[in-house]
Image (tube, rainbow, N blue to C red):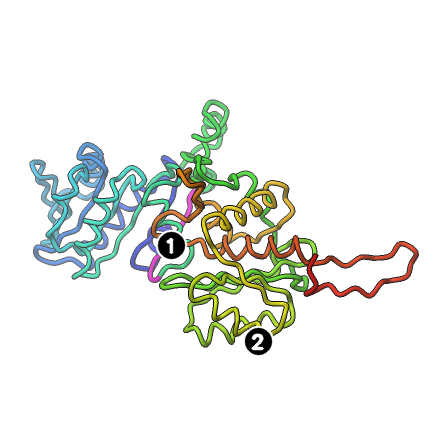
Amino acid sequence: MEAIYDPRRISAIEASTKSGKTHGCIVWLVEEAILGGGEGRNYWWIAPVATQADIAFTRMRRYLPRGMFEAARHNKTITLPNGAIIWFKGADRPDTLYGDDVHGAVIDEASRLKEEAWLAVRTTLTATRGRMRIIGNVKGRKNWFYRLARRAELGAHDMGYHRISAYDAVEAGVLAGDEIADAKEQMPAHAFRELFLAQPSNDEGNPFGAEAIEACIGPMSSGRPQVWGWDLGKHVDWTVGIALDQDGQVCRLERFRLPWRETIDSIQATTGSVPALIDSTGVGDPIVEMLQRNLGANIEGYQFTAPSKQKLMEGLAVAIQSRTVRIPDGPIVIELSQFEYEYHRTGIRYSAPEGMHDDCVCALALAVMHRSHVVMPVVVTSGIIAEIMRAPRMR
């Protein structure tokens, strides 16, 4: 129940089908209404359509002791002794969800809910600062719930993230292990991953491939940086620096939001004499020039244009699919997994989905490109060790 009783205001829960998430959230919403409710205070259960909201309405009436509540079937409400009202609503007409002040809410089957409905429900909690639980199966990557879950997983303010697989439910005694084994054998692999493991299928449009990304995941290297790639934050983006060691493993990850002066100081202190390829697009150009004055020829700039970004991402895709780069689990993997490409008349456009970030992807791609250019150390087979400048000399 850690996922449901997360102390943060919003908890995003990607979960296996039949894992007990609906039952747990019914109990949570009743407790919210009893402990924090009062005369006329509203609490909502939102499902994609009214018939799905009926299921939770029926279950809650069945679970609550008789005499503890009054149920109105015509508008699907349950009124508690303290006057709090729990409403069960379908989200098929999002415009009807605006207007009320709501003190707590559950959004059920979130991956199948319209984004307009999520936005409407979110506004109802603004004045009350009400708490929310958002639950659902995984259904691909191209929906608002997947994007919200990734933001929560990356540590967005006052948001918790939890994943509950069928095997977690088996361990908790909610599901039977042999039933999960049967489902795995009988269902298509992509459907089993989504419905029982809470893992998104490999949607078209990702240039790297889910399986290839997974094959590159490993621990953070403790080796020395050989090259750095830096993507400079603009507006609300992060400044991200990623270093690779001599084996192509990520050995450093820096991720921050700072004023430009402090950003320059941080990059300078972190990079030192190690070769670095830095985003020099727009405001990045004078920053790169300043770093070049301070650190010398080991700093190079890279201008992002549609063709140059395509070249950069295709190089990263080759490295990932050939497993010549190793990445730690966390924000890099999350961004790689949600990254997209689209065909346009003028070429291929690479970017993160709307509202998401690609700073880690760009920093990693810069590091991979720079590593392919930096001269590698050579050991002479005669036993005489050649003293070779590993950087910043270029081929």
Q: Secondary structure at mark 1?
A: helix
Q: Residue at x 75, y 65 (%)?
A: 389
Q: Secondary structure at mark 2?
A: helix
Q: Is residue 144 left or right of residue 292?
A: left
Task: Count all numbered tags in the image, as a single digit.
Answer: 2
Residue at image mark 1: 152
Magenta residue span: 157-164
> Residue 373: x and y, percent?
66, 55
Most distant residue in the top direction: 186
Mark-to-mark CA distance, 2 and 1: 39 Å
Residue sitting at 50 percent across and 40 percent down? 207
- Residue 121, visible in the rendered structure: yes
The three-letter amino acid code for the residue at tag 1 is: Ala
- The reply to whether dot 2 and dot 1 touch (C-beta < 8 Å) is no
Query: Is residue 151 rendered to the left or right of residue 62?
Result: right
Q: Amino acid at mark 2?
A: Arg
- Left or right of 383 in this view: 188: left
